[in-house]
Image (tube, helix red, strand yellow):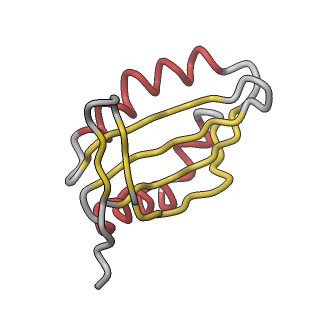
Amino acid sequence: MHALVSVWTMAEGRLPEQQRGLHEQIVPAVSKLPGFVAGYWNRDPVTGKAHGLIVFETEADARGLKDFIQSDTKRAAEAGLTYDSLAIVEVLASATTAVTARTYQSDRR
């Protein structure tokens, strides 16, 4: 599995609008993408930066979202968002509860 890890700068004073867009548009759309496994959208209240971690079954699935984001910066800018970084990373392990924990082997052999 692979994930798209992102860091975003959020325009001041637009948080309610941005949260509404996140819940009404982004989360539903991303969750329907091919290979989607899980998504986590976070905000650091100290820096105001937003951080995303979207997990996909394959690197190609993660790359599809990254490519879309990079090609559609105008819509993000209109919403007061600018991405600082986008990185595709390999998921090595995950844990959701003490009972459920998984380790992933590299797709590379």
Q: Is residue 32 above or below residue 42?
A: below
Q: Is residue 104 above or below residue 27?
A: below
**Left or right of residue 41, residue 30 in this image:** left
Q: Depth check: 50 or 71 in front? A: 50
Residue drawn at (63%, 47%) of the image: 7
Q: x%, y% of residue 1?
A: 30, 60
Q: x%, y% of residue 3?
A: 41, 55
Q: x%, y% of residue 107?
A: 28, 74
Number of marks drawn: 0
Q: x%, y% of residue 52?
A: 52, 42
Residue drawn at (37%, 46%) of the image: 94
Considering the image in quadrants, where does the C terminus appear?
Answer: bottom left
Q: Which residue occupies the extreme bottom position in the image?
A: 109
Residue drawn at (44%, 35%) of the image: 40
Q: Depth check: 72 or 107 in front? A: 107
**Left or right of residue 39, residue 105 in this image:** left
Tell me where residue 10 sits by quadrant. top right
Q: Which residue occupies the extreme right position in the image?
A: 46
Residue drawn at (36%, 39%) of the image: 95
Tell me where residue 66 sits by quadrant. bottom left
Q: Which residue occupies the extreme front position in the image?
A: 99
**Left or right of residue 50, residue 19 in this image:** left
Q: Is residue 85 above or below residue 31?
A: below
Q: Depth check: 28 or 89 in front? A: 89
